[in-house]
Image (cartoon, rainbow, N blue to C red):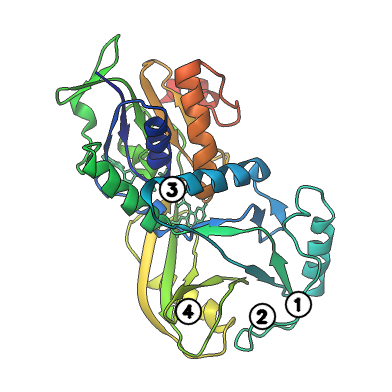
Amino acid sequence: MKDYIIVGLGLSGASLAYRLEKTGKSFLVFDDNSQEASKVAGGFMNPVILKRFTLAWKADIQMPKAVAFYSEMEELLGKEFLSPLEIYRRFSSVEEQNNWFEAADKPKLAPYLDTDLVSTVNPNVPGNHSFGKVLNTKRIDPRNLLESYAAHLLENDLLKEESFKHEDLVLSEEGVEYKGIKAKNIIFCEGFGLLNNPYFKYLPLRGNKGEYIIIKAPGLDLEVGVKSSVFIFPAGEDLYAVGATYSNTDKTPGPTESARQELVTKLKDLITVDFEVVHQVAGLRPSTIDRRPLVGRHPEHKNLYCCNGFGSRGILLAPMISEELLDLIEHEKDLDPETNISRFTKKWFNAS
Ligand SMILES: Cc1cc2nc3c(=O)[nH]c(=O)nc-3n(C[C@H](O)[C@H](O)[C@H](O)COP(=O)(O)OP(=O)(O)OC[C@H]3O[C@@H](n4cnc5c(N)ncnc54)[C@H](O)[C@@H]3O)c2cc1C
């Protein structure tokens, strides 16, 4: 009997699997590459919401935890995924500049907002107003991290690259059984794929599609990330990622022409050099109606768990939320009521 089955190897499933591995628990992961959100993510560990200059939910707690967590994964896998990346916010008005200073006065934001504004970051990225630097940010390369971790799990017979069929899951008092594999618990980390899960699809997962274009711009020479109406950051060898889009209506998985055009138009307003679009990626963010994760135990089946709803903040959320969920399962430690799926049970479960 294994301790756990995990369904999904995005940031959620990978964080849980890594924590289980570290504590010597036995587990098996299933992943079928049906969702791409984690792999196409920009990978920013930035606690500040750069549209409004506010702190993302609990981001001050998540940030140090995430840095330590991904550093440990780097050590385990013998690869580097974390890198420092300077991010600048281009201001579009004096009012925005003033809002930045106001935000920088707040104790939780002060460590992240530099009050020494700069007039230029690169001659090819002009601005009518100044630029503010976001301090203490980092970036991870999520695709590299997840592919390396998948290879590590495969080597150790801990990953099956196949679709998990919910109809083949058998529940019992002692745990669950799936195609002859018995486990005490099963955790579903399916991202937007949760909508196909008969046990948890009652949860209000909304989904928000995001797309990036990858451009080649040999004359740009930009070594920092710049956020304006769109975000651009260097990806090496004259390549830059530009994005992301946000759509609550399009739930198709692949890249779209409309997103490409939207990003190209916004980019032309940001940089002055020629560029060519060489690639485009898309993913569905598992966003929720109250912008909080969906974590916890199934209301009727005690061995079934869900770890989802990371929205646009999976990089910082996954290390903290995976720890909290395993604390619940292993030590009966209460979950944060703000993330516990029990907040939806009465209304959503009975109605579904
Ligand atoms: C364009 C874009 C940019 C983003 N940028 C950032 C960023 O810079 N910083 C940040 O913090 N967040 C970012 N995000 C958000 C972040 O990607 C998500 O919060 C996070 O990836 C969600 O992780 P997850 O593991 O819950 O879901 P997913 O990444 O969707 O993973 C779910 C996994 O489950 C698997 N799966 C599903 N169903 C089954 C099944 N039946 N059987 C087997 N396997 C199954 C899928 O194949 C997938 O691997 C971005 C998202 C997008 C789309």
Placement of 194 over or under 352, stated as above or below: below
Residue bearing mark 2: 121
Placement of 252 over or under 305, stated as above or below: below
Q: Is residue 43 left or right of residue 149?
A: right
Camera-side residue: 96 or 252?
96
Residue bearing mark 1: 118
Residue 309, x across and y down, in percent: 48, 40
Instruction: Say if residue 288 shows up in the picture.
Output: no
Residue bearing mark 3: 75
Name the kind of residue labelled 1 in the image.
Answer: Val
Say which of marks 4 and 3 sits in front.
3
Badge 2 marks a residue whose secondary structure is loop
Instruction: Say if residue 152 shows up in the picture.
Output: yes
Callout 4 crowding tier (Cα within 10 Å): few <14, some 14–19, many ≥20: many
Specify whether tag 2 is near ligand 1 (CB below 8 Å): no
Say which of marks 3 and 1 sits in front.
3
| Quadrant of image for the N terminus | top left
Tell me the distance, in whole angstroms, between the alpha carbons under discs 3 and 1.
Answer: 36 Å
Callout 3 crowding tier (Cα within 10 Å): few <14, some 14–19, many ≥20: few
Labelled pair 3, 1 in contact (Cβ < 8 Å): no
Marker disc for residue 264? 4
At 54% from the left and 42% from the top, the residue drawn is: 317
Tell me the distance, in whole angstroms, between the alpha carbons under discs 2 and 3.
Answer: 34 Å
Tell me the distance, in whole angstroms, between the alpha carbons under discs 1 and 4.
Answer: 26 Å
